[in-house]
Amino acid sequence: MKRALVILILTVTGLVIGPRLVLGGGVSGIAPLTPPGDSQWHSLLPADTHLLIETGAIEQFLDALDVTPPDWAAIYGRGHDDPGLDERLFNLNRGRDTKREGKMALAWRVTFLWPGELSDYDPRSGGFRVAVGPRFTPTRWGVVRFKPEELPSNLMAIPNPGQRETLQRRIGQGQPVEVDVALTGKLISPESLIYDFSHDEEGRGVIMPVVRIERIDFVILSCKLDRCR
């Protein structure tokens, strides 16, 4: 099944000088495209990063930060039409921000994944623009949706020369090329977690860890052609 994307089509201006060039004091969205089979996270990412990919790891991270899930039913009350809902959410968020201060997990470097898909090819840079959207992970805490504080406006995956022609052909034929977009960084402070409710599912709690992104990696999720490497 093709993964649903909240698509951000991004453009690149200027020349590519390096795969992780820092632009204007921020992180670059230009990075090499890692082939399938070469994506062992322990070798691709910084050694000190905490991989928040599996449900269990995400739950342990939230346990370390906030100890126990909130009582979503009590906070929701009579729902979005309840006049006290906004105040209860505000108190929940501010109270937990205060209790979270000083927790070791606040300083962790973390990596989470968003689904992405290669878009059109840019001959000037030799790379493919990337459309990307959030991933929603159901947990015993609620639905977790990591939120970058800011994403660069130039998400561009640079394949090796052996990949380029095959990927161009696949995209030209309308075949999707899906990628994992690995986003690495640290929680912002003090509002590092945002508690809210889903707008699509009545009473479903949503937790959004807000991460200041330090680096971006692209990995081909699946490729059935022998020459994708």
Image: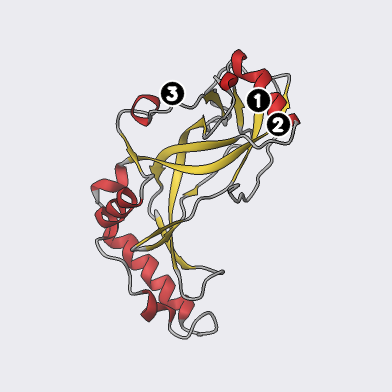
Question: Picture coordinates of residue 127 (x, y %)?
Answer: 65, 23
Q: From mark 3 to mark 1, how far is it between C-alphas?
A: 17 Å
Outermost residue toward the top in this view: 161
Question: Picture coordinates of residue 40 (x, y %)?
Answer: 38, 28
Residue at 65% over, 19% down: 164
Badge 2 density bin: few <14, some 14–19, many ≥20, Cα 10 Å: some
Marks 2 and 1 close (CB-CB < 8 Å)? yes
Q: From mark 2 to mark 3, how far is it between C-alphas?
A: 22 Å
Q: Classify the position of the C terminus by image quarter.
A: top right
Residue linked to disc 2? 171
| In the rendered image, the vertical position of residue 116 relative to residue 42, given as above or below | below
**Amino acid type at mark 1:** Leu
Q: From mark 2 to mark 1, how far is it between C-alphas?
A: 6 Å
**Amino acid type at mark 2:** Ile
Question: Who comes first in sequence, dot 2 or dot 3?
Answer: 3
Left or right, 126 with reference to 63: right
| In the rendered image, the vertical position of residue 178 relative to residue 149, given as above or below | above
68, 160: nearer the viewer? 160
Residue linked to disc 1? 167
Marks 2 and 3 close (CB-CB < 8 Å)? no
Residue linked to disc 3? 38
Residue at 39% over, 44% down: 53
| In the rendered image, the vertical position of residue 223 relative to residue 90, given as above or below | above
87, 82: nearer the viewer? 82
| Callout 3 secondary element | loop
Badge 3 density bin: few <14, some 14–19, many ≥20, Cα 10 Å: few
| Callout 1 secondary element | helix
- Residue 8: which numbered mark, if any? none
Q: Is residue 30 visible?
A: yes
